[in-house]
Image: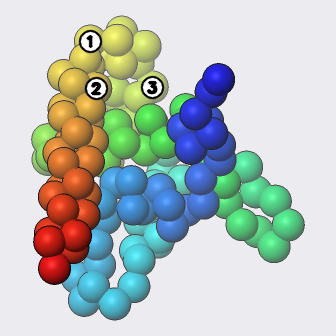
Amino acid sequence: MTDKTNNSYKTISEVVKILGLKSKRAKSIPTHTIRYWEKEFKQIKPKIFNGNRRYYDIENIKIIEKIHFLLKDQGMTINGVKKILNDEKLLKLDEMSNKSIKARDFKNKLIKISNIIKSLKK
């Protein structure tokens, strides 16, 4: 049996939550960041259905996570990230980002569990 949550398409808001993106004012979800990356990185190809709503599959989310890691955690420039994504050899050598992304996912899950435990104690 497959896990529907991992295999289903995600909305742009869900992708923002997966990445943990936050606006500076924390009043809105910064979906504009993902839209900007779509324009800059040809590798991001969401499905766009009725009403121009974007939906991302797991492969697109992995690419977005890699972009996020390289830009935000590694401090690379957009042009630097483009070179990595466009060069198959560099992309294969970039295993460090995949491991760090998995570690960040694990950390996010621990934080969620911790928050659930805190709310249950109240």
Q: Nearer the viewer, mark 3 or mark 2?
A: 2
Q: Which residue is mark 2?
A: 98
* Amino acid beneath label 3: Asn
Above or below: residue 97 compared with residue 30: above
Q: Which residue is mark 3?
A: 86
Q: Nearer the viewer, mark 1 or mark 3?
A: 1
Above or below: residue 32 compared with residue 75: below
Which mark identifies residue 22?
Answer: none
- Labels 1 and 3: the sequence-earlier one: 3
Residue 11 seen in the figure: yes
What SS does tag 3 mark? helix
The structure residue drawn at horizontal position 76% and vertical position 57%, both measured from the top left corner, is 48
Please identify the quarter of the rendering in which residue 106 is found: top left
The C terminus lies in quadrant: bottom left
Q: Which residue is mark 1?
A: 93
Q: Badge 1: few (under 14), some or many (20 or more) residues near its Cα, within 10 Å?
A: few
Q: Residue 117: x and y, percent?
A: 18, 62
